[in-house]
Image (spheres, helix red, strand yellow):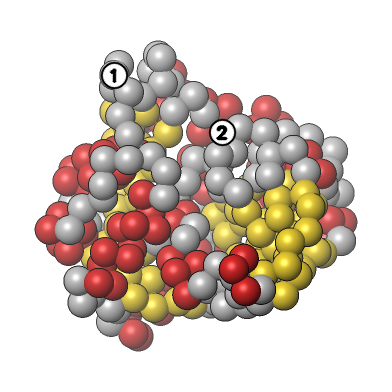
Amino acid sequence: MTAASVSIITPTCNRARFMPRIAHCVLSQKVDWEWHVLDDSAAPDPYMESLAARDPRVHYRHSPDPISIGAKRNAMIEAARAPFIAHFDDDDIYGPDYLARMLEVQRHTGVDMLKLSGFFLYAPASDFFGYLDLTAVRGWHYELTKDGYTTVNFSGEKEPGKEYMVFYGFSYLYRREPALAQPYLDISLFEDARFAQSWINGGYSMSFTSYATRECLHWIHPTATARSYSAYRIPSFLLPQLFPVCAELRDAYPQAVDRPGQGR
């Protein structure tokens, strides 16, 4: 088996309905990869156990005891064997060229950590399709939650500031060795932003790219925990045109989409 160029890590808990969808995204990647999944749901996921038994690139571990997201990431990084770590969150969507594009940018820049500078997002509950530019820290934005959306004006005290760029760790790609030396905190909220900020404070290089933006869609669903913002709203009928993989996944895994009829 060819050595993996990147280790994908996915912490998960009680998200069994999403796992076939994210597995489809992983299996479609056009680089040599290995995939680590650490699950602390009440019971193991039969789908993931079966997939790991069939594909030696897939490493699935179930823990009967609760583990923080930060601790899960550290454990998977420790088990990883590739020089780079890529985050694939269980509830987001990644196109087949996503990792190839991210690794290409890393090769050109040589940075220790790379992430998207902006991304598309979709909230099925409100049929909201939008785009967030992380460099736009002022002005009116849509504030999206699992239930709907409102508007907020980023100005003065409400301005998120430059640290806003390090949030949304679903698009992180970074070197494994520094992550072993400077790991995640044992927490489950903002563990990604604190991890990235600690790298910046420690002198590691970090850069941002839009090159893979069309290959990643942030999904805001009823069990989502993070609040998201969008600088722009896009007609949702354009979703399958901009992200053909969404229609493919919706048809193949309707149980993993909150409202399968949306976005047509």
Outermost residue to the front: 157
Seen from the viewer's position, the closer of residues 21 and 85 is 85
What kind of element bears circle 2? helix
The dot on residue 18 is 2
Q: Residue at x 78, y 35 (%)?
A: 259
Disc 1 or disc 2, which is closer to the eye?
1
For this view, does 129 lie left or right of residue 195?
right
Q: Residue at x 26, y 64 (%)?
A: 198
Q: Position of residue 91 (x, y in %)?
A: 55, 41
Amino acid type shown at disc 1: Asp
Spatial distance from mark 1 to mark 2, Cα to Cα? 21 Å
For this view, does 155 lie left or right of residue 69?
right
Seen from the viewer's position, the closer of residues 183 and 97 is 183
Q: Is residue 24 visible?
A: no
Q: Is residue 111 visible?
A: yes
Q: In this rendering, is residue 241 above or below 24?
A: below
What kind of element bears circle 1? loop
Q: Which residue is mark 1?
A: 65
